[in-house]
Image (cartoon, grey):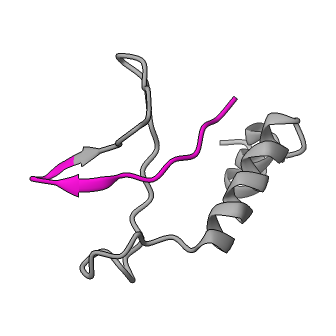
């Protein structure tokens, strides 16, 4: 299962407030380049909802398997 949250950069470190992350957890970071320098939260509520739905689809197994994507991109290398 995936968890979606927002964080801020403070002193060059990503700080996720009010989020309990287990030690050693792997996280994926998406930088919104349009708002990276203007102190906005970056991602719109609509974008967060769309991303949350995509994660839920993947959790339900509704995505395209990596093997299929790899074969289409790279053939039988």
Magenta span includes 62: no
* Number of marks in picture: 0
In which quadrant of the rendered view does residue 65 lie?
top right
Rendered location of residue 26, percent (x, y)? 43, 29
Q: Name the residue at the left extreme.
A: 11
Q: Is residue 19 left or right of residue 64?
A: left
* 34 vs 68: above or below: below
What residue is at 76 percent from the left and 54 percent from the top?
Answer: 54
What residue is at 35 percent from the left and 16 percent from the top?
Answer: 23
Q: Is residue 67 left or right of residue 48?
A: right
Rendered location of residue 21, percent (x, y)? 42, 25
Rendered location of residue 10, percent (x, y)? 16, 54
Magenta span includes 11: yes
What residue is at 51 percent from the left and 70 percent from the top?
Answer: 43
Between 58 and 1, the one lying in front of the other is 1
What residue is at 90 percent from the left and 44 percent from the top?
Answer: 62
Q: Is residue 66 left or right of residue 15?
A: right
Q: Quadrant of the C terminus?
A: top right
- SS majority, magenta: loop
Q: Name the residue at the top extreme.
A: 23
Between 18 and 6, the one lying in front of the other is 18
Rendered location of residue 8, percent (x, y)? 30, 56
The stretch of residues the image draws in magenta is: 1-13
In which quadrant of the rendered view does residue 31 lie?
bottom left
């Amino acid at each position: 299962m995936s968890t979606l949250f927002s964080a801020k950069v403070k002193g060059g470190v990503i700080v996720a407030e009010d989020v309990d992350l287990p030690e050693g957890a792997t996280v994926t970071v998406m930088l919104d380049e349009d708002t990276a320098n203007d102190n906005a939260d970056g991602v719109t509520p609509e974008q967060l909802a769309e991303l949350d739905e995509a994660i839920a689809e993947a959790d339900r197994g509704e995505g395209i398997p990596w093997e299929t994507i790899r074969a289409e991109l790279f053939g039988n290398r």
